[in-house]
Every structure is written in structure tokens, then in C-alpha cells.
Image (cartoon, helix red, strand yellow):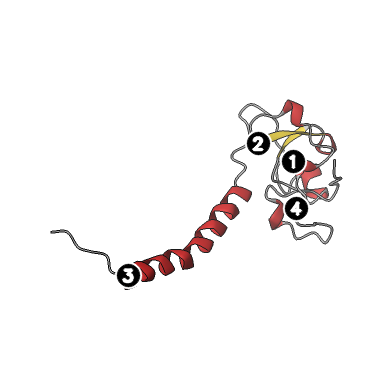
Amino acid sequence: MKENLSRRSFFQMFLGVVAVAPIIMKSTKLEAATNCGAAPAGKKAAAVGVGMAKSLDYVEVAAQSKNAKYVKGSDCGNCKYYQDKKAAGSWAPCTMMGMSFVASCGWCKSYMKK
């Protein structure tokens, strides 16, 4: 049995989708911004809260930084110390971290825009 979609039902469905779309888009962007993946195997990665990473307030997800110097939009991926030519996935060595690998979506207080 084939049902006809009434004009009213169509608009109710349409408005429901429109209402939910921004929520879905925001959660997808947030997940992308907070997921740089795991550190590359066999590479020395900076450990949050240990040694140089601790002294520089390094975090693997920039938006989670509690440092007053953090500015939205700044992350390791667009920092001049991030060695993206030597990257392994979304991680690369950082000169400020003694060439330890850091996440491209990370941040530390020595951040300097490229």
C-alpha cells in the first residue's frame, strides 16, 4: 500500500531535519577538532604533563588548554616550530619539545604562528 505524503507531513519532517542539522554539524566538527589520532608507533611523542610538555603547558587538543595565552584557532599544525615535513599522520616533531612528536591539533605556550 502506497501512502501519499501530505504537504503538512512534508513540512513537519523538513522542519525536524532542519532543527537537528546544526547539532549534527557541530558535533562532527568538534570530533574532527579533537581527534588527531594516536601518536605514531615507534616515534618519541611528547607526553602531556611530563618534562618539557609540562613546563610548556602542552595539550593534545588545543581547545582544552587552560593557559591564558591560548587563542582560539592556534594549534601545533600552524606553529612555526611544528616540523610538518617530517610528519607521521597528524603528528610531527616540534623543535620546542626537543623534536618529540606532537599532535597537529595540540597547543603549548611557546606557540608562534607560521
The residue under label 4 is 73
C-beta proximity under 8 Å, tags 1 and 2 = yes
Instruction: Give the residue type at disc 3.
Output: Arg
Residue 51 can be seen, yes or no: no
- Compared to residue 78, the image places residue 73 above or below, namely below
Question: Label 3: which residue?
Answer: 7
Residue at 75 percent across and 60 percent down: it is 66
Q: Earlier in the sequence, mark 1 or mark 2?
A: 1
Q: Which mark is residue 19?
A: none
Residue 75 place in picture, x, y as percent:
75, 47
Check residue 90 in the rendering and tell me which mark sits there, or answer none: 2
Please tell me the numbered disc located at residue 77. Answer: 1
Q: The residue under label 2 is which amino acid type? A: Ser
Position of residue 1 in the picture relative to residue 68 (left or right): left
Residue at position x 59%, y 46% in the image: 35
Q: CA distance from mark 1 to mark 2?
A: 8 Å
Give the class, few, some or many, for how many residues have Cα within 10 Å of label 2's Cα (few <14, many ≥20). some
Q: What is the CA distance from the residue labelled 2 to the residue labelled 3?
A: 48 Å
Q: Residues within 10 Å of mark 4 (few under 14, many from 20)?
A: few
Question: Residue type at mark 1?
Answer: Gly
User: What element does badge 2 sit on?
Assistant: loop
**For the residues marked 4 and 1, what is the alpha-carbon distance in whole angstroms?**
10 Å
| SS at circle 1 | helix
Q: Is residue 38 left or right of residue 45?
A: left
x%, y% of residue 109?
A: 83, 51
Q: For the residue marked with disc 4, what is the amino acid?
A: Gly
- Quarter occupied by residue 69: bottom right
